[in-house]
């Protein structure tokens, strides 16, 4: 098997709000869109994102009324502190400030209008 692209599909109540969040703060571009649907992409190696409105018939019947919850969408980035400063300056909803975990992970989180948690991560230099 040769995987050529990775995509995460998120079911949300308000597709337009999440689309605007990802394009405004995280550099995604709209590849395709229609009522209740948006496909987002970036020019780098980030995962593509598909947003589907809750209740959409393309979803299996048992999943139509569910929405993304309990999910953290994490992106490893370089220059994490600069990204946090940029996002703060742009008014992004940062819901966990920059911190470093004991195992060396530096991170902060922001949350989109539909409650999808985005975590930006950078690994701290390991002691030699």
Image (spheres, helix red, strand yellow):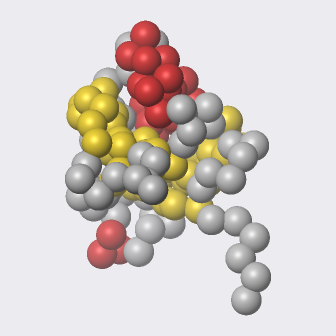
Determine the image quadrant of residue 64: bottom left
Who's the residue at 55% across and 53% down the image?
Answer: 50
Q: Position of residue 12 (x, y in %)?
A: 37, 48
Q: Is residue 36 above or below residue 1?
A: above
- Say which quadrant the N terminus sits in: bottom right
Query: Viewer-proximal residue, 113 or 57?
Result: 113
Residue at the extreme top of the image, as rendered: 89
Residue sticking out furthest to the bottom: 1
| Residue pictured at 70% horizontal, 65% vertical | 5
Q: Residue at x 43, y 18 (%)?
A: 85
Percent x, y of residue 56: 43, 58
Give the quarter of the image for residue 118. Answer: top left
Extreme residue toward the front, this view: 128
- Coordinates of residue 81 in the picture (x, y in percent): 44, 27
**From this viewpoint, is residue 122 visible?**
yes
Report the label total. Answer: 0
Q: Nearer the viewer, residue 91 or 57?
A: 91
28 or 9, which lies in front?
A: 28
Q: Is residue 53 visible?
A: no
Task: Locate residue 4 relative to residue 123 in the image: left or right.
Answer: right
| Viewport quadrant of the C terminus | bottom left
Q: Is residue 81 left or right of residue 27?
A: left
**Residue 127, horizontal then vertical, whole percent:** 40, 53
Vertical relation: 118 (above or below) 4: above
């Amino acid at each position: 098997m040769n995987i050529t692209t990775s995509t995460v599909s998120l079911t949300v109540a308000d597709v337009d709000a999440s689309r605007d969040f990802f394009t405004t703060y995280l550099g995604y571009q709209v590849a395709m869109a229609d009522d209740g649907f948006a496909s987002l992409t970036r020019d780098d190696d980030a995962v593509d994102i598909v947003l589907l409105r809750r209740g959409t018939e393309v979803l299996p019947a048992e999943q139509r009324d569910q929405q993304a919850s309990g999910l953290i969408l994490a992106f490893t980035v370089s220059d994490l502190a600069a990204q946090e400063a940029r996002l703060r300056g742009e008014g992004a909803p940062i819901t966990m400030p920059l911190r470093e975990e004991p195992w060396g992970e530096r991170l902060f989180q922001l949350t989109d209008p539909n409650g999808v948690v985005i975590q930006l991560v950078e690994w701290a230099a390991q002691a030699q």
